[in-house]
Image (tube, rainbow, N blue to C red):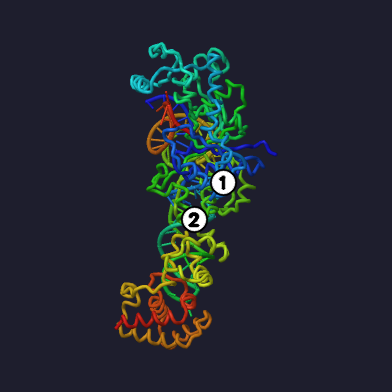
Amino acid sequence: MSSVRTRFAPSPTGFLHVGGVRTAFYNYLFAQHHGGTFILRLEDTDRERFVPEGVGQIVEALDWLGLEPNEGFWISQGQHKNIEYIQSERQKTGLYQKVAEQLVEQGLAYYSYVTPERYQEYKQDAAHQPFVYRKSMEAEFHDGKSPGPEGEYPIRLDVEAIRTEFHHLADNGVAWHDEIRGDFVDNLSLIEDFILIKSDGFPTYNFANVVDDHEMQISHVIRGDEFISSTSKHVLLYELFGWQAPKFVHLPPINGLDGKKLSKRTGDTNTLEYRDKGYLPEALLNFLVLLGWNDGSTQEVFSQQELIDKFSLDRLNTSPAVFDPKRLDWMNGSYIRELSIDALYKKVADFWPDEAQAADDAYKKQVLGLVQERLKYFSELPELTRFFFVDLPVDDSLISEHKQLKKLSSGELRDLLEKAKASLEASSFTTDDLTQKLNDLLEQTGQKPAVLFSLIRIATTQAPASPALADSLAALGKDRSLSRIETQLKHLG
RNA sequence: GGUCCCAUCGUCUAGCGGUUAGGACACCGGGUUUUCAUCCCGGCAACAGGGGUUCGAUUCCCCUUGGGAUCACCA
């Protein structure tokens, strides 16, 4: 077993963001590539922003994507599994409190009396200058009470104390290495006395993250680059505890088309919306993996196994990528086209138009086969196939706006349709025979396909677009095709 | 404002000192006996700017500009 252990550690403050999916996937691929372990940990220490449904939504999305962890929290049949990977559960064991109090005993951390409000005032006063909070500022806030057992006051790290006790940190600063961005170093004077345990007894991200990554023996922390600036805090903690820090990889952000952070306006951000619109998870993943990674070749479409085989940190990009929905559509369409009809049929089960309810499987499969190549995502299915299941009202604009047909008089149109009707009445309505009959009709009328076929197509579908004419007619069948031509004829008067 | 990150076609990207700067998406033409799509062919389109280093910079260094992150009892 490889010693590579990665983790995805979302916060249930809402749904799973597609940007988070890319992060999860990179963690997953890296672990799989090395035969390592991919872990899911829930970071729910912020009880104020906690969204109860968030937990289920995150797992639902990961499950849909097939990113089940090798280890860690999961929900199976409504049951929460491995809750020891949930930080709020871990907090109940007193784990974080114990570690923090050890630091207090060592004189490296202290109970802090400053209120958030007063802290903000301090900051305001320090406008335009760097502001770092220090223990020496505590004196004026001490109300004489001693800290209660419930953690009435938060615990802060005492950086000044660290400076005097850890000379190498005082001299060299806190240094760390990012696997794709190189070396970083922060002077201790830049690191403020940050909070380890909040006054509600829950650990902060900066603290819990370190304790848990160490306990869970995480080898590689692959996360968004918004954490670059707080990594020195984490590394400082590892140094204090004498723990070996994991390797760090900070991913660039994913932006929307407007160059700003991906938002509702530039594309859906909720992963489950992609499922509901009918995107294939493997296509979404393939699209996302290329937003910041490539194998150096011109290959665009990768199977999951290929990605596992080829994924490596050194091919990761450091610059931001823009999420282009059109490229996703292309990717999804290409995945859809690769599917067998039977496989595709199973996947689109929930996307048929209401009118298809009564249709049998064989017919729906036939229709599906005709639209497969033009389907970009499944929720397009109704508009693409409705006319196969129900007679649509005659739409005059289809003819009046047709660049060739609009030149013909209704008499000429009627004449053509009558001939078509007569010809089709003699057809067995197999695709081959229909093709034959249609070709004969071309000769008989002396018309161009653009005119004749368009007219028949419009009369029989009443749709702006449809699959190849002979195929569509064969699927519709003789009765339906002829009756629709009849309807169009009557409409032309 | 302090600290930090980033910078090749509109978009995703290849490039790791010498290339006609390549591919893909999108877009625009053309072809495949109608439309839309698929597929095929073709086209449009980029090294942010300025200094260095070098025989030679898209590539290495610095500055400028632009974009972004962070400066919470959020993660």
Q: CA distance from mark 1 to mark 2?
A: 23 Å
Mark earlier in primary sequence (1, 2):
1
- Chain of the residue on which disc 1 is drawn: A
Mark carried by residue A279: 2
Identify residue type, mark 2: Tyr
Q: Position of residue B53 (x, y in %)?
A: 54, 31
Q: Position of residue B2 (x, y in %)?
A: 41, 24
Disc count in the image?
Answer: 2
User: Which residue carries the number 1 mark?
Assistant: A76
Circle 1 sits in a helix, a strand or a loop, which is it? strand
Circle 2 sits in a helix, a strand or a loop, which is it? loop
Q: Residue at x 39, y 74 (%)?
A: A391
Identify residue type, mark 1: Ser
Residue A69: quadrant of the picture: top right
Q: Nearer the viewer, mark 1 or mark 2?
A: 1
Q: Please tell me if label 1 and label 2 are on a single chain.
A: yes
Q: Nearer the viewer, residue A187 or A426?
A: A426
- Chain of the residue on which disc 2 is drawn: A
Whether residue A340 is situated above or below residue A123 in the rendered picture = below
Q: Position of residue B69 (x, y in %)?
A: 43, 34
In the image, taking residue A295 as reference, residue B72 lies left or right, namely: left
Q: Residue at x 47, y 40 (%)?
A: A253
